[in-house]
Image (cartoon, grey):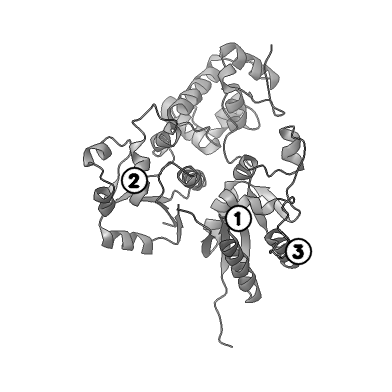
Amino acid sequence: MPAMNLLNYCIIVRCGPDQQSQALSAFEFTQALLAQGHKVERVFFYQQGVLTASSLRTPAQGELNITKMWQQLQFENKLELDVCIAAALQNGIVDKTESERYELSAHNLASGFQLAGLGQLAGATITCDRVVTFGASQ
Amino acid sequence: MQLELDKDGYLCKLSDWNTDVAEYLASTVNIKMTSEHWEVITLLRQFYTDTGISPAMRILVKMVKKALGPDKGNSIYLLTLFPDSPAKLAAKIAGLPRPTNCL
Amino acid sequence: MSTLIVMRSTPYGNTNAKDALDIALILATFEQSPSLLYQGAGLQQLLLHSQHTTPFKHIGNILKAFPIYDIEQIYIDKASINEQNISLDRLNDLPVEYKLLDTNQVTELMHNHQHIMVF
């Protein structure tokens, strides 16, 4: 096998889990990077991408559950799955802390994901060799 | 005073703000407003009116430096006025949303 | 220069314009001021700053904060000006300095940045 240049990646997911092909591409690309030994410093869920992190998603039978797939990948690789806090609050994805802060009736951030500021993304542009975006809508 | 505040003590309705409310909000974080405090609060409100942005610390420092000079446009000075977290405290007293990207 | 943000969306219909600006501002807060390239329908974002009556004034006004954030590399794709039927006069009132780029210069700009985000 030829020697390969191993790089540090940041993946940005901007599409919701309902955009199945793009959501799946983001997942499979990340999985392939890890399988090849690259570092994935963080996966940053932005815009509609934050909906991936809802523990209340219930895809129909026979459909992929992309939330569970990310959770499994996170568990196996100690991935950092960052969910943009501003977009998350806007779209009704909250963890326990935010639920208490805003006195909401429940919290639904799926385990394995964490709320994060855009600063995490800014940091990644400094430390990562590549920033790859999936699900950009125009 | 009948004011709706969130758990962190920020105004729920930004339109509730007036100078008395500012004095009250300052008292909730143990700050006694002086003309030096007001200088910064006034700048911050003007910036928010112009741009719609509630700025983070680095930008607050630059803004104060530009308007009031380097003696005041530094983090040590702002920390003496608004201890621990100048951007957050000043935004709270000025009746602005939480500074963005503060996490 | 590390990050180029390409603005291709109108300020209407989705949150791309605002979401891109949020990234630009946070990069600048981290002393990583990005370059911005306005292209295609994205040019419509630049016409908002003088229209104080629209509910979208918020996005237009963010331009006024660019100087204090040291966001100074503002580029406009020359070909898009005709395509979007925008008169140059309207761009003259912009509260920021900008450079017009032809197609080759746009290509060069993209080559000169490590990261590119398209909104």
Q: Is residue C49 visible?
A: yes
- Numbered tag placed on residue C43 in the rendering: 2
Instruction: Describe residue A117's horizontal placement relative to residue C100 as left or right.
Output: right
Residue B46 in the image, given as x and y percentages of width and height? 46, 24
Residue B55 in the image, given as x and y percentages of width and height? 52, 34
Which element type, helix, strand or loop, lies under badge 3?
helix
Which element type, helix, strand or loop, lies under badge 2?
helix
The outermost residue toward the bottom is: A1
Cα gap from disc 1 to disc 2, whole angstroms? 27 Å
Give the residue type that dot 2 points to: Leu
Identify the residue under disc 1. A44
Give the residue type that dot 1 points to: Phe
Tell me the chain of label 1: A
Circle 1 or circle 2, nearest the eye: 2
Q: Is residue A38 visible?
A: no
Displayed quadrant of residue C111: bottom left
Locate the C terminus of chain B and report the quarter of the image it occupies: top right
Displayed quadrant of residue B97: top right
